[in-house]
Every structure is written in structure tokens, then in C-alpha cells.
Image: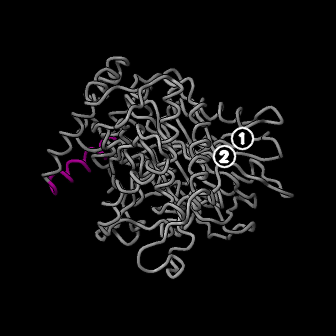
Amino acid sequence: MRERLRPADVTFLGEETSRAPLHNATLEVFDPGERSFEYEDLLALIGERIDFVPRYRQRIRTVPGRLGMPVWVDEDDFDLRYHVRRSALPRPGSMDQLRELVARIMSRRLDFQRPLWELYFVEGLEGGRVALLSKSHQVLVDGVSTVDLGQVLLDVDPTPRHVPYDHWEPSGEPSTSGLLLDTVRESVQHPSRVFSTVRVNTDSAVRAGRGAFGALGQVAAAVANRKPHPETPLDAELCEQRRVVTVRTTFEDHRKVRRVHGGTVNDVILATVTGALRSWLMTRAESVGAGRALRALVPMSVIDDDREPTSLGSQVAGHLLDLPIGESSPVVRLHQVSYAFKAHKETGRAVAADTLADVAGFAPTTFHALGSRVAAEHQRKHFDLVITNVPGPQFPLYAAGARMVESYPIPPLLPGRALAIGVTSYDGYVHYGINADRDALPDVEVLGQCLTESLEELVDSASDARPRAPRGRTRASNPRARGRSGA
């Protein structure tokens, strides 16, 4: 029997609109060095590795009359070149030009008549570099049945590892009568699923119909997400276009702040974002008085002993955090953020950053996708923005022999929220990816500048302070603490 979509996946599909498409993206920059990295090399690499993610060759087929949950079916005429697309910037292409291209691609919805992913091979960057922009829908990556394609493409050395190749043949398109027969058989075997199917499909149809009216769907979402605290520029009706900003900072700067002031690198990252939001709002003459805060949903990885051993061994849970933008001292902001996360750490379920970084392949792409799923599930709660932060390995990775030098997560926007921030630490750097509504936040580039300045402010405070002595045994006595990214 074919695998059916889960209720949460059907809900995602019903809530998506042209103004709030629910796809995740990752922008990666590669330096081929003396090697060449061509479009055909990428096609060959994906052709070898796509067997590890069979969902990437499947599309969604609905059951007539919505009598059952939609099912995953193999694409009979799967065309890899349709999904892996070639693009170029006028040489020598700048990062500004690349970001503008990424913003335009992020604005477009995926084709639901095909497997729900695209990957763009972008040539023409200055210095002979190339970029990969991968885009996949939230229903595609669940961390159990499917991980993100980006997790399986990278190798730890320039020589690609050999993987066994199995010739793939689609299982065949099911007939309408076959789908109905499977649905009836499942209903007899599991009667309770009938009521669940009716409820989910009805809710999905209502949301889809509401979203089809465009502005009406946005108004309904805004009412559902109305917040009790003062409105900010982040609370806005979305348009169909996006702006993308990337910021690259050094990992050592974050570690220096952590060594001096305590906490984790994750705390430093969130304090940096808090300081940047404060400065950016001040440039807009917005109120940042004492006690003012922005509420962020921060998906966190937690241990889950009930998960199947074949899964990633962890799940992602939403954590609501008030970012103290009303606090003028960067050190106090850091301590307030660190204290807010103390309860999460003391549950014993928090996953150490080095554990996540050691997950096979390049795990950040998958964990960012899972974080976006969690955010979508919690979108009716009161928060202003989503911040996903996933630590990656602190050594170089390669695709078809080309070294990856930068990796920026681009999380999707939720209705009524004009900003989302993704963070990935990798090979000595911390990469911030900012996705913003094009009309609501025309000055989002200023926020990118404020991120750099906010981190510099924290680094300066660490340079003027004495390192904080850890309680109990020293960090040097704990071998697992060395190289930890913070979580």
C-alpha cells in the first residue's frame, strides 16, 4: 500500500498561499580551485545520490472526493534537468547580484504537479566561484522518511566517495479506481482514520479556499495571529516578493564572547540578533524603551527516546523567547537571553551542538527544514519572527571536488510575519541568512549591517572584560566541550 501524507502535511498544503509559500532554501557558495565544477558534474552527483532520498522522485496524488489522505507516487517521467536548473550572473557576479537572484527564486511557488524541489546551479560569481540554491517544500523533508537532498551531496574530502548505484524504475501511476480501493480497504482496517481524514481534508479545503481570495486570506491570518503587545514593522501583510540578505561572521568572535561572558555560542548568536534588531528599529525611529521585547520562535533540537533508530535520533521543538530589544547593554542582553534558555538546557533533553554537527552528511539543511515545519505548526501562537540556528561541522566539505566556502539558510516567511532569520555555523564562520518581505521591509539590508555591528559590540565588551571562571570543573577538563558550537 502506498504511503499517505500525514495530517500535518495536509494542513501545510492547505495553508500555503502565493504570498506565503512554504518552501525552505539553502544558498551555498563553492570554490572549485584548480578543479572545474560544471553543471554536468552536479547532474552526475545528484544522479548518484538521489537514491538516498527517494521522496525527491515522488509527487503528491490526491484521492478523488478527498475520501482519503493524499498519497506519494513515483513520477513516471522524472526529469532531473527540470529540477536542477542552470543560471548565471554577468561576470564577475557580486554577492549583491546573487542575493537579488535568490530573492526572486524564493518568491516563486513550487509546481505541485511535480516533485516539490528545485536546485539552481549559478555560474559567473567573481573569483570563479559557483553557487547552489536548493529549494524544497516543507512536506518533502520530515527527518524520518526523508532528509534534505543537501545532506547527502557533500563529502569530507575533494575526492567524491563512491556510492552504489541502483537503476531506478518508477512503481507505476495508480489508477483512480486503485486509489479508491486502497482508501476503502484502509478505512475498513482502521475506522478511526476516517474521522481524522474528513476533519483534516475539510480544514484544508477551507484554508485553501480562504487563501485563494488573496487579501482575504491575509486578513484572516492576521486576525488569527493578532498579538497582545505593540505592533512592529515585522507585523505586516505579506506581498508575493522577497528580499534576501546574507551576513558572514567568524566563529572565533562568537567563541570569544562565550569564553568571557559564559553561556553558549547559541546564546551569543541570539544576543547578536537582538542587538541588531534593536539598532535597526532605532534607525526607523521605532520605540525601544526599557522592557521592550520582540518574541521569537526558536526551534530547538531535543532528545526523543521514542523515535525510530533509523531517524536522526532527535526531534525539533518550538521554544518561545523574548528578545530584550529594550536593553541598551549588550552584555546584559546576552545574560538575559542565556537565562531564558536555562530552563531548556536543564530539562536534560537539549542536544549538544557537537552532537548535531556530527550527524552524517551536512545536517544543517535538514534541521533548518525541520525547524521551519515546527514554526508553521506554531504559527497561531504569538511571536514576531522565526530564528533557526543549526551548528555545522568545523571543517571543509566538498561537492564534486569543489570546496564549499559559505552556507546560508533561507527560511520561509509565515503569514503576518515579514522577517525570518536562519543561522548556520560552518568551517570557522557563522552564516546568517535573512528572508524578508520586499514591500514591508525595504531597508532590510540595514539589518544586515546592524548584525555585524552588534557582534562587534559584543566582541569589544569581551575584550575589555576578564574571562568568566566556570563553575565546578574547568572547560578544558571537559573534552566534549572543546569545539562546541552551543545549543
Callouts 1 and 2 close, C-beta under 8 Å: yes
In the rendered view, does 82 fall on the left or right side of 371? right
Residue drawn at point x = 48 percent, y = 52 percent: 389
The total number of labels drawn is: 2
Q: Position of residue 5 (x, y in %)?
A: 33, 48
Q: Disc 1 to disc 2, how far (Cα)?
A: 6 Å
Q: Residues within 10 Å of mark 2 (few under 14, many from 20)?
A: many
Q: Residue 453 in the image: x percent, y percent?
A: 61, 41
Q: Residue 132 — which label?
A: 2
Which part of the image, by quadrant, shows the N terminus?
bottom left
Q: Which residue is mark 1?
A: 122
The kind of residue on which mark 1 rests is Val
The residue range painted magenta reads 176-190
Of 78 and 236, the residue lying toward us:
236
In the image, 440: left or right of 341?
Answer: right
Identify the element where label 2 is drawn.
strand
Residue 31 versus residue 451: which sits nearer the camera? 451
The image quadrant of residue 335 is: bottom left
Note whether 407 is above or below 476 in the view shown: above
Residue pictured at 71% horizontal, 32% vertical: 97
Residue 83: x %, y % from top left: 60, 42
Q: Main secondary structure of the magenta part?
A: helix
Image quadrant where one finds the C terminus: bottom left
Q: Does residue 67 appear in the picture of this structure?
A: yes
Measured as percent of width and height from the top left, residue 356 is found at 48, 65
